[in-house]
């Protein structure tokens, strides 16, 4: 294994403990998902995040890497977008 590969594995080690790992479809919406389904999935995903032992690491990853899609660290796409906007305007 290369040093670069080892660093990537280490950087993502927290994800192994995420409660989302067994239900990834809950955390991402398809482009054609109706609005009501999107809201229900986001509500269920954020509820699961609230019980997750790695919520802080997940949120830090999502914000730090500007994840555009899905629920990460208990935050929806819209919530992260608003947070990024506030950070830009200071």
Image (cartoon, rainbow, N blue to C red):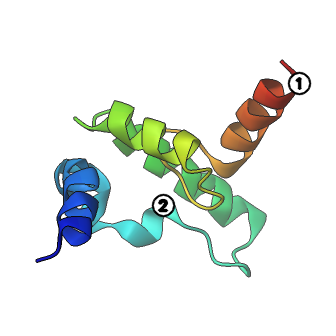
Q: Secondary structure at mark 2?
A: helix
Res. 6 image quadrant: bottom left
Residue receiving disc 1: 89
Q: Is residue 62 visible?
A: yes
Q: Position of residue 33 (x, y in %)?
A: 69, 75
Q: Quadrant of the N terminus?
A: bottom left
Q: Secondary structure at mark 1?
A: helix
Is 31 left or right of 1, judged from the image as shown? Answer: right
Residue receiving disc 2: 27
Q: Is residue 56 above or below residue 7?
A: above
Res. 67 image quadrant: bottom right
The alpha-carbon separation of the residues under discs 1 and 2 comes to 28 Å
Residue neighbourhood size for the residue with mark 1, other residues' Cα within 10 Å, grouped as few (<14), some (14–19), many (≥20): few
Q: Position of residue 4 (x, y in %)?
A: 26, 67
Q: Is residue 73 visible?
A: no
Q: Residue furthest left?
A: 1
Q: Is residue 43 above or below residue 31?
A: above
Nearer the observer, 76 or 3: 3
Res. 8 image quadrant: bottom left
Question: Residue shown at 73%/81% (left/top)?
Answer: 32
Is 76 left or right of 55, judged from the image as shown? Answer: right
Question: Residue shown at 18%/66% (left/top)?
Answer: 3
Q: Is residue 29 above or below residue 82?
A: below
Q: Residue furthest bottom?
A: 32
Q: Quadrant of the C terminus?
A: top right
Nearer the observer, 6 or 73: 6
Q: Earlier in the sequence, mark 1 or mark 2?
A: 2
Q: Position of residue 66 (x, y in %)?
A: 62, 50
């Amino acid at each position: 294994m290369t040093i670069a590969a080892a660093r990537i594995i280490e950087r993502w080690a927290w994800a192994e403990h995420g409660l989302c790992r067994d239900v990834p479809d809950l955390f991402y919406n398809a482009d054609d998902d109706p609005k009501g389904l999107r809201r229900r999935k986001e509500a269920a995903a954020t509820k699961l995040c609230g019980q997750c032992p790695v919520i802080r690491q997940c949120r830090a990853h999502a914000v730090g890497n500007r994840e555009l899609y899905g629920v990460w660290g208990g935050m929806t796409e819209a919530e992260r977008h608003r947070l990024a906007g506030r950070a830009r305007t200071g």
